[in-house]
Image: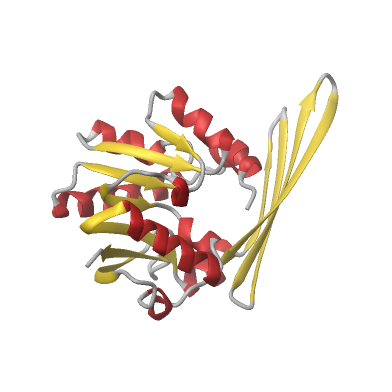
Amino acid sequence: MGLDLYGKIEPLLGFEEEKQKLYEAFLDKLSELGIKNFLDIGCGSGAFMQLAKNAGFEPEGIDISRVMVERARKAELQVYHGDICQLDRKYEAATAVFDVINYLDKEELAKFFACVKNLLKKGGYFICDMNTLYGFEEIAQGSLILDNDEQFVAIDAEFADNRLTTKIYLFEKRDGCYNKEAEEIVQYYHEIGFLKKLGLELIDIDFISLYGEEADKVLMTWRVT
């Protein structure tokens, strides 16, 4: 799963208001549970971690994208580069914010949940969000073009057979010429019932609307028993 190009264009996408709303829902949940220190899985550039840190939490992060990790470290955040299955630490809680688990197919998701369980203490919590079917069909699917003097971005996303395939093209002007980069990202729609079979106890669920009146996100809280 390559997300380095997405990491480069993320600041151009303009989803800050929606992300802020989701971040606040996560922070509210962490506060309800009395959590201070947690691991943010798929932390990206560290935007959620920074907000959490400013609010008095003690976040650590991990991401597989070197571009994202380097960006987060420049903000003086404690971030690891690599796979959570290789992380030899224990936490009271972990988070996976803004579509992280949608990037995993069923087989990968089963392994992911096993690794999350392994890095949490007994009684620890895992909080994650996931796109609803409406979120995929009505919100994520479609095309987007962004253009300025130095960059041109084209994004085309198609949802079929419970898979969202997103093609990203970036043209950057360098020394009077344009350099092209391309990336394809696949996300998967999952039923909550499937996730409940993966070894963690679902203790809370909230439906969230970021882009309209109908819920496009589901926020789930899991516990290690």
List x then y, in percent, for residue 40.
37, 45
On the image, the x and y values in percent for residue 201 come to: 26, 71
Residue at 39 percent across and 71 percent down: it is: 214
Which residue is most to the right? Answer: 177
Looking at the image, residue 45 sits to the left or right of residue 35; the answer is: right
Q: Position of residue 63 (x, y in %)?
A: 49, 43
Viewer-closest of 162 and 224: 224
Picture quarter containing residue 209?
bottom left
Q: What residue sits 41% from the left and 25% below the top?
A: 75
Give the image location of residue 107, x and y in percent.
54, 70
In the figure, is residue 75 to the left or right of 154? left
Vertical comparison of 152 with 214: above or below: above
**Residue 17 occupies which quadrant of the picture?**
top left
In terms of depth relative to the viewer, which is nearer, 26 or 224? 224
Instruction: Please give left or right for residue 120 compared with residue 80 in the image.
Output: left
Say above or below: 73 vs 137. above
- Residue drawn 44% across and 77% down? 191
Q: Residue at (40%, 52%) from the top-left corner? A: 97
